[in-house]
């Protein structure tokens, strides 16, 4: 059943950091959001409360978007409540700091699958997909080989998918963020932060 809201937005990885900031910035009286995280249900509920205070409708969905059936469940929820999804902000991601040779296959697969999760919008022949990438996907970072590789893959994936979905009126873009003061970067020392600045 379709509601009267003009825009329905799904934001993955929205319990903190960039995803939370994106969700809050998009919350408005004519929007509905489905916000997601993999584990932090309590934090996600707090974000939902902030979104509702801004006049937007909001539902939470806790689940690992590296799992295809979980992503399907999340989109089924969005469609069943709001009747459509106009915008997907594909933000969920994890980082692993360390030498490439010390990374286990499971660590590699987890980073690859989370950072490359996406849901297409071909059924409605419209929509916008925004993938959150990183400058490390453009330039690479020592001791963050897998993270850099996944973000580089997201950049290539975005370009290819944009060409493929353009005839269906679906726009696909990526934002390659620099270092942002989030919990994910909380391990950086003051000296490292100064170097980045």
Image (cartoon, rainbow, N blue to C red):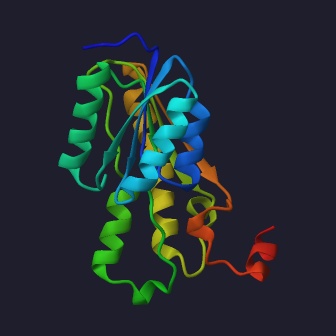
Q: Quadrant of the C terminus?
A: bottom right
Q: Is residue 168 left or right of residue 158?
A: left
Q: Is residue 6 above or below residue 191?
A: above
Q: Position of residue 86 (x, y in %)?
A: 41, 24
- Does residue 163 show up? yes
Q: Position of residue 13 (x, y in %)?
A: 44, 51
- Pick the residue in front: 157 or 125: 125
Q: How many marks?
A: 0
Q: Position of residue 59 (x, y in %)?
A: 36, 35
Instruction: Determine which quarter of the picture holds residue 83.
Output: top left
- Does residue 92 show up? no
Q: Is residue 55 left or right of residue 179?
A: left
Residue at far left of view? 69
Q: Is residue 196 left or right of residue 112?
A: right
Q: Position of residue 109 (x, y in %)?
A: 30, 69
Q: Quadrant of the N terminus?
A: top left
Residue at far top of view? 4
- Pick the residue in front: 72 or 59: 59
User: Which residue is depicted at the point 66% across and 77% down?
Assistant: 188
Q: Is residue 185 left or right of residue 153?
A: right
Q: Is residue 99 above or below residue 40?
A: below
User: Which residue is depicted at the point 47% across and 75% down?
Assistant: 96
User: Which residue is depicted at the point 75% across and 73% down?
Assistant: 193
């Amino acid at each position: 059943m379709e509601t009267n809201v003009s825009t329905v937005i799904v934001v993955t990885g929205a319990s903190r950091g960039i995803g939370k900031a994106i969700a809050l910035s998009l919350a408005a009286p004519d929007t509905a959001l489905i916000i997601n995280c993999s584990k932090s249900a309590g934090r996600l509920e707090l974000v939902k409360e902030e979104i509702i205070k801004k006049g937007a409708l909001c539902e939470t969905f806790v689940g690992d978007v590296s799992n295809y059936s979980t992503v399907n469940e999340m989109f089924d929820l969005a469609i069943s409540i709001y009747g459509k999804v106009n915008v997907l902000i594909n933000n969920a991601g994890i980082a692993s700091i360390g030498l490439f040779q010390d990374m286990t296959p499971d660590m590699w697969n987890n980073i690859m699958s989370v950072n490359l999760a996406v849901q297409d919008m071909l059924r409605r022949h419209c929509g916008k997909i925004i993938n959150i990438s990183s400058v490390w996907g453009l330039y690479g970072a020592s001791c963050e080989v897998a993270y850099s590789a996944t973000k580089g893959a997201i950049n290539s994936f975005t370009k290819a998918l944009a060409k493929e979905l353009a005839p269906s009126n679906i726009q696909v873009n990526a934002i390659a963020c620099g270092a942002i003061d989030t919990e994910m970067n909380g391990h950086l020392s003051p000296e490292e932060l100064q170097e980045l600045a």
